[in-house]
Amino acid sequence: MSVILLAIGLVLVVEGLVLALAPSRMEDILKALSEIPFETRRMLGLAAVGLGTVLVWLAKGVFGA
C-alpha cells in the first residue's frame, strides 16, 4: 500500500509542477495530443504503463526500497 501511495504522490508532484511552472504550455500540449492518432496514444499509454511497472519493480526489488 505504501508503494501505491508513493507512486500516486509522485505523479501528483510531477503533474503539479507542469501546471505550476508552465500553465500556458498545457494548452499546447493538449492540442498536440489531440492531433496524435487514437492507436498511437494507446500504444504510448501502454508503453508508459510498462516502463512505470519496470521502474517500480526495480525500485522495490533490486534496490530494496
Image (cartoon, rainbow, N blue to C red):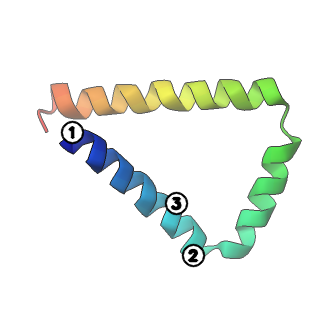
What amino acid type should be assigned to the residue bearing mark 1? Answer: Met
Give the residue at mark 1. Answer: 1
Q: Where is residue 62 in the image (x, y as percent from the top left)?
A: 17, 26
Measure the C-alpha gap from mark 2 to mark 1.
30 Å
Q: Where is residue 29 in the image (x, y as percent from the top left)?
A: 75, 57
Label whose residue precedes the other's in the sequence (1 or 3): 1
Q: Identify which residue is drawn at 34% across, 32% down.
A: 55
- Which numbered tag is attached to residue 57? none
Give the crowd class for mark 1: few <14, some 14-19, many >=20 residues within 10 Å: few
Give the residue at mark 3. Answer: 15
Which of the 4 image quarters holds residue 56?
top left
Between residues 2 and 46, which one lies in front from this camera angle?
Answer: 2
21 w.r.t. 3: above or below: below
Q: Position of residue 12 (x, y in %)?
A: 44, 59
What amino acid type should be assigned to the residue bearing mark 3? Answer: Glu
Q: Identify which residue is drawn at 36% across, 25% down.
A: 54
Label 1 SS: loop
Label 3 SS: helix
Mark 2 or mark 3, whichever is nearer to me: 3
Give the residue at mark 2. Answer: 21
Measure the C-alpha gap from mark 2 to mark 3.
10 Å
Give the crowd class for mark 3: few <14, some 14-19, many >=20 residues within 10 Å: few
22 w.r.t. 8: above or below: below
Q: Identify which residue is drawn at 43% across, 52% down.
A: 11
Q: Is residue 15 left or right of residue 59?
A: right
Which of the 4 image quarters holds residue 48?
top right
Mark 1 or mark 3, whichever is nearer to me: 1
Q: Residue furthest right?
A: 35
Label whose residue precedes the other's in the sequence (2 or 3): 3
Q: Identify which residue is drawn at 78% across, 65% down.
A: 27
Label whose residue precedes the other's in the sequence (2 or 1): 1
56 w.r.t. 7: above or below: above
